[in-house]
Amino acid sequence: MMTGENSSSEGYFVLLGFSNWPHLEVALFVVILIFYLMTLVGNLFIIILSYLDAHLHTPMYFFLSNLSFLDLCYTTSSIPQLLVNLWGPEKTISYTGCMIQLYFVLALGTTECVLLVVMSYDRYAAVCRPLHYAVLMNPRFCHLLAVASWVSGFTASALHSSFTFWVPLCGHRQVDHFFCEVPALLRLSCADTHVNELTLLIMSSIFVLIPLILILSSYSAIARAVLRMQSTAGLQRAFRTCGAHLMVVSLFFIPVICIYLQPPSGKSQDQGKFIALFYTVVTPSLNPLIYTLRNKDVRGAVRRLVGQEREM
């Protein structure tokens, strides 16, 4: 983007965010701050509890800890900047800050798509291959899957974000969004961005549609296995663990598909902002509740932890 008389030469962008609704900014600040605090507390709770309790040293909670850490990073990459912009009249972000934000938002979002596939495979192995589960999901393989998720996300983001920042902006500085994201930045260009839009569509298909197909395939196999179960307790446990994951998948993928796989003319920019607000603010705060609510393993871990503290 550092070409011609780019706005980047002035060193900053203006994030318009929700400037069209100045009367809503204070209310949005309070609501978003509450959800952000819920995200921090809930996800830190899962990470710490999974680390402290030996009964939770399982593949499921290992991947859940990864997801919680990812959600912490994902929200922190955009929400603090949004809160600052909502609170004061200044709504600027430095050129370097915009580059960094775009990179991490893309990297962490892509990583989550891949990690959710890994978690669905873990549930498939637990339900459909219970006798081979310990062998299939051994610690070394679990760590390899987690590393592959993170590396794929950060590598894809490096390629796509660098490609985006080569687009000439021709003096524009106002980003019509609350964070730096690809579609909003492409709208600033006075050059032909069809190649960039095609690249975005291809990348979104690879890291959104393919993971979603793999997840649905896993759950189709799980559904068939569950329906063949004779044990009522086994049925209930399978529905609890798989149901929580399916709910998280729905909350993440549906808004992402609406943003990145819908034609640009098919939605208004204001609608896009509120959809993005949902998956960057609301979804990460709900994930800990979805996974821990009515979860006997977590309740048992909390009781054991509290009991140990009382004994001390």
Image (cartoon, rainbow, N blue to C red):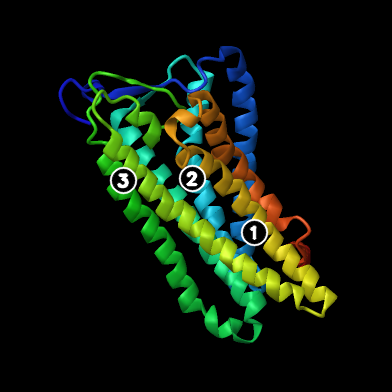
Pick the residue in front: 193 or 248: 193
Q: Which residue carries the number 1 mark?
A: 245
Name the side, left or right, on which 117 lies relative to 167.
right
Which quadrant holds residue 186? top left
Badge 2 amino acid: Tyr
Q: Tag count in the figure?
A: 3
| Residue 4 rendering spot, x and y as whole percentages | 15, 23
Which quadrant holds residue 236? bottom right
How dense is the environment of label 3, judged by Cα within 10 Å: few (below 14), some, or many (20 and up)?
A: many
Identify the secondary structure beneath mark 3. helix
Q: Which residue carries the number 3 mark?
A: 160
Badge 3 amino acid: His
| Residue 177 rendering spot, x and y as whole percentages | 45, 26
Residue 74's disc number = 2
Q: Nearer the viewer, mark 1 or mark 2?
A: 1
Name the side, left or right, on which 280 lies relative to 246.
left
Residue at point 54%, 78% (across, down): 137
Q: Is residue 62 visible?
A: no
Pick the residue in front: 296 or 246: 246
| Residue 142 rendering spot, x and y as whole percentages | 49, 73
Residues under numbered marks 1 and 2 in contact, where contact means CB atoms less than 8 Å apart: no
